[in-house]
Amino acid sequence: MKKKVSLKDIAQKVGVSTALVSYVLNNKNIGRIGKEVTEKIKDAAKELNYRTNQIARSLKTNRTFIIGLIVADISNTFWSSLARIIEDEAEKYNYTVIFGSSDENAEKSLKLTNILLNHQVDGFILAPAEDSLSQLIFLQENEIPFVLIDRYFPEIKANYVAIDNYKAAYTLVKHVIDKGYKRIGLITFKSSLFHFQERKRGYAAAIEENNVTVMQTWIKEVGINSSKEAVEKAIDELTGLQEPVEVILFASNYLSIYGLKYIVNLPLKVPDDLALISFDESDAADLFYSPVTHIKQPLEQMGQLATKILLEHIEKRLPISEVNLEPEFIIRKSTSANKN
Amino acid sequence: MKKKVSLKDIAQKVGVSTALVSYVLNNKNIGRIGKEVTEKIKDAAKELNYRTNQIARSLKTNRTFIIGLIVADISNTFWSSLARIIEDEAEKYNYTVIFGSSDENAEKSLKLTNILLNHQVDGFILAPAEDSLSQLIFLQENEIPFVLIDRYFPEIKANYVAIDNYKAAYTLVKHVIDKGYKRIGLITFKSSLFHFQERKRGYAAAIEENNVTVMQTWIKEVGINSSKEAVEKAIDELTGLQEPVEVILFASNYLSIYGLKYIVNLPLKVPDDLALISFDESDAADLFYSPVTHIKQPLEQMGQLATKILLEHIEKRLPISEVNLEPEFIIRKSTSANKN
DNA sequence: CTGAAAGCGCTTACAG
DNA sequence: CTGAAAGCGCTTACAG
């Protein structure tokens, strides 16, 4: 790289101190510095194509205007959509985003957090992995601002933006129960993460409220980084039961995409042989031959609010924001058969 | 934020200079510093939970270990998949990724480039927008390493990793011509970007080679940030011609996703009434009732190579790398009708 | 109204 | 073998 032009270069050219140049270029010269000098400095800056070295500035000001975003996997459309919204919102406040994918792995997320911390990010937007509570506590102890997104940790009081997953799952399952379905399967992740537990709890509550006992064989929990084969196996088992399940609830878009790609090639037909409900929208759910009834999370709001809350907390000490957003419940063809 | 512990804190605690601490913590003390002092310093660092301030280091070393990634839109699965691959590859070399979405807009991309440059990124991986050639020339003049991904600018000699888009389009169209199709429509972007021009050229070449003249009414060019309505209108026009088109080629996944979501609700049936071919894979193309024959770009290779080339160029001056990768041609049901 | 000086937290050439 | 000193490129409290 060519050597860069610094304040000093401008100062020398104009014949003033770097201090003056800094003041002028940062518009901190209101009613202080003579108009002539100001002009000269601005001209020189333009002529030399000066570019402020944000790193030097950050070292002095203790602010980088970078926020760290740690998601499960940036290549998943749920997270990449959120990333885009966060990027746009951050940009409004002149912040830039540096990101990392944790793969739902606490070790990886710790490593990422440390790297981003070394880069002196001003704060984090996080979708923490299982077993990463200690990392959050560490951030709190060090007074580093962060906002949880999509997720919630009941053990600590922290900023978060999410939906009520219990209610969302309950709504989905209640919908099919009202249609007359009894045997309802769940494909979810084997995970202690609160939102997955809540989804399971909501699922079970809706069923039991209807005086049906949830069979353990109805619940399939796949490893959080499972391949599609695990999902396929779960579907086979649920539909191969002595009394096969009449509905399958997918607890995330990741699961439903794998599931739909498998079911599309199965002889059984949706919704007549099997009804489908799912968390999260996806192109797959839209273009499946029987579009899937699902819960659509308000990504726009989630991303924007998370960013806003984070930036406010970076600016000043504020009380914790705990935000539960209302998801959309979208009814499609996959639950349109009549069981009554 | 709490005040951070610095080298000075460790130095004071142990009673040595910060220089010594720096040497020890960076393992630059081989056969230099006494074992005892080394131990003491390392212990103190651990005890105080020292974290090196990457920003201070960068200011001194002129290296941030951050690469700037500018794509068209991180929420598009093509770019987010690439982002993930680049993230993983970069991480192997201890680099982190800071990203931005240009929305195919040269002004926005200029702004992004400047911001990332201010943050002193060590180099860029870029999918430049239309009319942003001057930005690339600027980077070259300033000797800032970059690699183009997915795109190529014939006007300059620069590192790039892409596929041969002419050949890819030709292959797709040749496939349907061999099946007996004559009237083939193209939905692409109104864009001077080289890869889109090449796709159009390959499309036309395959048709004309078959002694058919390409009708101007077969080619629909929508604005590069069009809504889905523009794609829908294009489809209506192509299928509503006096002599309707028998095949539609979508020049990107963005176009085909919108297109498929529309066509799925149309009375005409794929592949019998209309055959479909497309660039890029997608869940939509997979789950469309008649899965779509397409060109699959080797994202893994593209991302990894782009990252490797960039990092090598950051490390040292090297000759330009121009890489054309071989895409996969995937034949599916959408072109399975027999026209002969 | 203007600017010299100190300092942010590192690294490293150099002197001892 | 060890470490004081300079300096990366900024900002800003403070003195004049």
Image: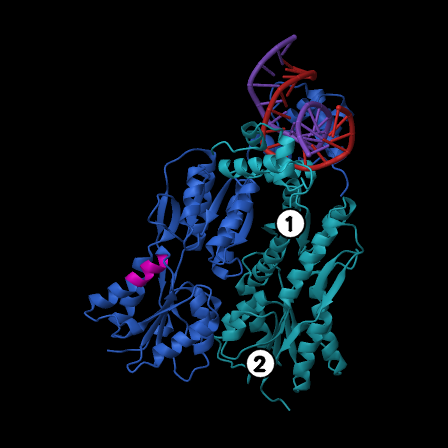
Chain colours: A cyan, B blue, C purple, D red
Which residue is most to the bottom? A340
- How much space separates mark 1 and mark 2, taking CA atoms? 38 Å
Q: Is residue A295 above or below residue B296?
A: below
Give the crowd class for mark 2: few <14, some 14-19, many >=20 residues within 10 Å: some
Which residue is most to the left? B211
Chain letter of disc 2?
Answer: A
Name which residue type carries label 1. Ile
Q: Are marks 1 and 2 on the same chain?
A: yes
Q: Position of residue B14 (x, y in %)?
A: 76, 24
Q: Nearer the viewer, residue A86 or A41?
A: A41
| Residue B218 is one of the magenta-drawn residues | no
Q: Nearer the viewer, residue B225 or B171?
A: B225
Helix, strand or loop under label 2: loop
Name which residue type carries label 2. Arg
Q: Position of residue A197 (x, y in %)?
A: 72, 65
Helix, strand or loop under label 1: strand
Q: Which numbered tag is attached to residue A332?
A: 2
Can residue A130 be spotted in the picture? Answer: yes
Q: Position of residue B57 (x, y in %)?
A: 62, 33
| Residue A6 in which image quadrant | top right
Residue linked to disc 1? A67
Magenta residue span: B195-201
Q: Quadrant of the C terminus of chain A?
A: bottom right
Chain letter of disc 1?
Answer: A
Q: Is residue A287 above or below residue B326?
A: below
Viewer-nearest of discs 1 and 2: 1
